[in-house]
Amino acid sequence: MATSTSTEPPEQQPSLKRAIGPKLLILFVIGDILGTGIYATTGKVAGKVGGALWLPFLIGFIVAIMTAASYVELVGKYPKAAGAALYTQKAFRVPFLTFIVAFMVMCSGLSSASAAARAFSGDYFQEFTDAVPPTLIAILFILALAALALRGVSESVKTNVVLTIVELTGLVIILVIGASAIFTGSGEPSRLGEFQASGTGFALMTSILGATALGFFAFVGFEDSVNMAEETKDPVRTFPRAIFLGVGVTGTIYVLVALVSSLLVDYRVLETSSGPLLEVVKAGGVDFPPKLFALIALFAVTNSALINIMMASRLCYGLANEKVLPRGMGRVLPKRRTPVNGIIFVTVIAIGLVSTGEIEGLGDTTAFLLLCVFTVVNVAVLVLRKDHVEHSHFRTPTILPVLGAITSVILASPLSERGSDVYIRAGVLVAIGIVLWAVNKAWMKVRHEEEAARR
C-alpha cells in the first residue's frame, strides 16, 4: 500500500476531487441521516419511553434543526474539510480543545459505523442465516466498506445514492403498511399515548430525555456532510438547501415511522428486537415478504456505515492539512485521490469498536459524543460572529444556536439515564485521544528543534 502513496507533504498533494453536485449532496445528507438509527434503534427507544415513541423522535428533530442551522452558517463561512474541528480552532484558538473535538467527531462516526455493523449482523441478517458468527460478519462488513471508500469518492457517493433510494423505499413500505392498518381499523391507537414510566413527575421526564438522547442517534449524519465541503461544487450555495432539506425530510419520516411502529407492535416486542421494523412488517397484515424487507434494511445500515467511514477518513485528511495530526495522515492516492492512510486508520478503530458493545450502547455512545461536540459548535457560531469573511453566506437566527447549546448539554447530561458503559466507552476513547495529542505534540516539538538546528 505504501508504494502507491505519495511521500510529498499534504500541501503538495493532489487536491480532493469536486465530484458532488447539489442533488448528490442532498441524497448524501438524507442517506447519512437515514439508516441504522431508525432501522435498528426504534425498539430500544420504545423500551425507554413506551408506546409514545414518536415523542422522542419529534424532540430530536427539533434539536437537530437548531444545531444544523449552526453547521450551515459555519460551512458557508468556512467551506473546508475538518468540520467541527475547524470551527473550534477558529473560535477558541486552543489546539488541545480542537484535537479533542476532532477526535470525538471521528470516534462518533466510527461508533456509528460499528453500530451499523452490529445491526447488519443482527436480526435482519439472521432472517437469511445464523450460520456465521455475528462478530465475524460485522468485521468483514467494515473491511468491505473500507475497500469501497478507498476506491474513490465518486464511486462511494454514487453507491450512497443507490443505497439511499433503497432505504427510503423500505421506510415508504412501513408508511404504506401503517396507512393500510389505519384504513382497515387494525392496530392499537391507545399505545400512542402510553408511557413506560408511571406518573407525571421526574421519572417521566428522565424517561423521555433518555429516549430522546438515544433516538437522537437516528438524526446524526448532517454534520458528516460538512467534511465533504472540499469535494462539493459551490459549497457556499449548495449546503444550506441540502442540510435543511435532508433534516426536514428525515425528521418527518422518522416521526411517521415511529407512529406506525407503535400503532402495530407493542413496545415490549419492539424493545427485544435488533430489527424492529421487521416486526412491523410481520404485524402489518400486508402480504410483504419479510426476507425482502430484511434485505432492504441491510442496504440501509450499509449506507450509514459507508458514509461514516468516508467522513472519518476525510476528517483525518483535513486535520493533517491543519497540522493537528501528523502529515502522513493526509496522504492521498495519486490516481484515486482518496485519503488512503486516513481510511486505514479509521478502519482499524472501527473494527476494535465492534467488539465493545451492541447496537444500543454503540448508538448511545455516538449520540453522547456528538451532543458534546454540538454544544461546542453552537457556542462557536456565536463566537465567530465577530470574524467576517469576504463572501456572503447563510446566517442563522441567534436564538437557534443558544437553544441548540442548552438542549445538547441537557441530553448529554446524566438526566438522560444512559448506561455507565456509554460514559466508560466515551471516556476511554477521549483518553486515547489525549495520548495521541501528547504524542503528536512531542513529534512536532522534535521536528521544530531539528529544523532550528539545521538553520
Image: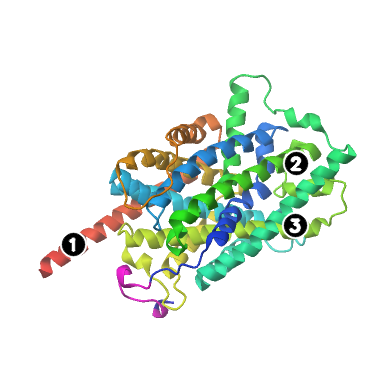
Q: Quadrant of residue 265?
A: top right
Residue 127 visible (yes or no): no
Residue 9 falls inside the magenta stretch: yes
Residue for point 42% across, 79% down: 4
Helix, strand or loop status at disc 1: helix
Q: Residue furthest bottom?
A: 3
Helix, strand or loop status at disc 2: helix
Residue for point 70% across, 32% down: 52
Q: Given contact means CB atoms under 8 Å apart, are the residues at marks 3 and 1 in contact?
A: no
Color scheme of the displayed model = rainbow
Q: Which residue is mark 1?
A: 448
Residue 408 falls inside the magenta stretch: no
Which residues, given as a range, are shown in magenta? 3-14
Q: Which residue is mark 2?
A: 261
The disc, 1 or 2, on the residue closer to the chain's N-terminal end is 2
- Look at label 2 and name its amino acid: Ser
Q: Quadrant of the C terminus?
A: bottom left
Query: Residue 100 location in percent, x, y?
Result: 37, 48
Q: Which mark is residue 302?
A: none
Query: Residue 8 location in percent, x, y?
Result: 31, 74
- Look at label 3 and name its amino acid: Ala
Residues at marks 3 and 1, CA–CA distance in whole angstroms:
55 Å
